[in-house]
Amino acid sequence: MKFGVRKPSWKKSFSARTRGRAVRSLKRAVNPYYGKKGMGWINNPHKALYNKVYHKTSFKLFKWY
């Protein structure tokens, strides 16, 4: 588990803005429940718990600026 400052990844940021956006729009068109709040607990509870703890224990460095 990571504690403290997150290290930004430019590669992941670019991917989320290009290919990731197209994949999400396709999934939304097929599955009406995709991307809705609370679906992570139904699909994969272990990952949802990990993400909840991660987001509460780490912080963004650029948020301060």
Image (cartoon, rainbow, N blue to C red):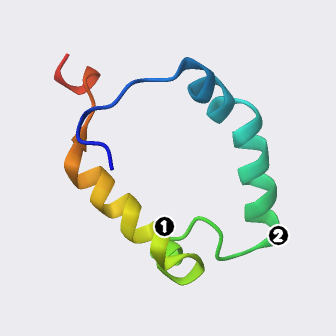
Residue 64 x, y percent position in the rendering: 17, 22
Residue 25 x, y percent position in the rendering: 75, 52
Query: On the rendered structure, is 25 left or right of 62?
Result: right
Q: Which residue lies furthest to the bottom in this view?
A: 42
Identify the element where label 2 is drawn: helix
Between circles 2 and 1, the one closer to the viewer is 1
Tally of marks = 2
Residue 44 x, y percent position in the rendering: 55, 75
Q: In the rendered image of this protein, does residue 4 appear above or below residue 26? A: above
Q: Mark 2 points at which residue?
A: 30
| Neighbour tally class for label 2: few under 14, some 14-19, many 20 plus, Cα within 10 Å | few
Q: In the rendered image of this protein, does residue 17 appear above or below residue 1? A: above
Residues at marks 2 and 1 touching, judged by CB atoms closer than 8 Å: no
Identify the element where label 1 is drawn: helix
Q: Name the residue under label 1.
A: 47
Where residue 62 sits, quadrant-wise, is top left
Residue placed at 64% from the left, 30% from the top?
17
Query: On the rendered structure, is 29 left or right of 5?
Result: right
Asked whether residue 37 appears in the rendered view, the answer is no
Q: What residue type is labelled 1?
A: Lys
Q: Earlier in the sequence, mark 2 or mark 1?
A: 2
Q: Which sits in the foreground, 31 or 41?
A: 41
Q: In the rendered image of this protein, does residue 47 appear above or below residue 21? A: below
Where residue 22 sits, quadrant-wise, is top right
Q: Which residue lies furthest to the left in this view?
A: 64
Query: On the rendered structure, is 55 left or right of 40?
Result: left
Q: Which sits in the foreground, 63 or 44?
A: 44
Q: Which amino acid does label 2 sit on?
A: Val
CA gap, disc 2 and disc 1:
23 Å
Asked whether residue 42 appears in the rendered view, the answer is yes
Residue placed at 30% from the left, 51% from the top?
55
Point out the image quarter for the C terminus.
top left
